[in-house]
Amino acid sequence: MSDQCIFCKIVRGEIPADIVFKDDDCVVFRDINPAAPIHLLVVPKNHVVSLQDVGPADGEWLGRMMALIPKIASDNGCDPGPQGGFRVVINSGAHGGQEVGHLHFHIMGGPRPWAGRAAPNA
Ligand code: DGP
């Protein structure tokens, strides 16, 4: 955990968020500035700065988080199958367009065209 990190504060319940799922590994909440009709952030409870900071020892919890994504997407309105689906984005570091220094997966879905940002920091 990091004292000043905004996502750690959401994980600790110190600031509000529209949380749709939580388990031992992660918290999932709606993006405050959605780029798609459905835009969720999957945030590990551990303070990991970015994907650049993970390695082989992180495979188990990362794999569990990744494997949750299809169910979280469909539970929150993403249509199944090839006619539906969703986009997953992980921005990493300044050149990757990362704004919040706590690893997170964006899940974006809903019928196209998407109004507003087509993708975070695209
Ligand atoms: P990134 O650029 O990948 O670091 O994306 C950060 C996303 O986090 C961005 O789409 C907006 C979202 N965000 C930033 N602060 C907050 C917040 O306080 N609450 C929520 N729900 N989302 C936030």
Image (tube, rainbow, N blue to C red):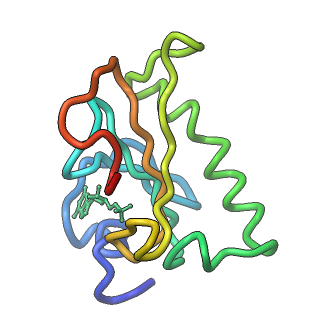
The percent coordinates of residue 108 (x first, y second) are: 40, 37
Quarter of the rendered image showing ligand 1: bottom left
Of residue 64 and residue 109, the one placed in the foreground of this image is: 109
The percent coordinates of residue 48 (x first, y second) are: 53, 77
Side of 57 relative to 1 (left or right): right
Side of 6 relative to 45 (left or right): left
Residue at (29%, 34%) from the top-left corner?
A: 36
Vertical order, 25 against 6 (above or below): above
How many labels, in total? 0
- Residue found at the very far bottom of the displayed protein: 3
Side of 119 relative to 81 (left or right): left
The percent coordinates of residue 71 (x first, y second) are: 56, 31
Vertical order, 31 against 38 (above or below): below
Side of 34 relative to 26 (left or right): left
Residue at (60%, 41%) from the top-left corner?
A: 68
Picture quarter with the N terminus: bottom left
Of residue 79 and residue 24, the one placed in the foreground of this image is: 79
Residue at (58%, 13%) from the top-left corner?
A: 82
Residue at (56%, 39%) from the top-left corner?
A: 69
- Residue found at the very far top of the displayed protein: 83
The percent coordinates of residue 116 (x first, y second) are: 18, 38
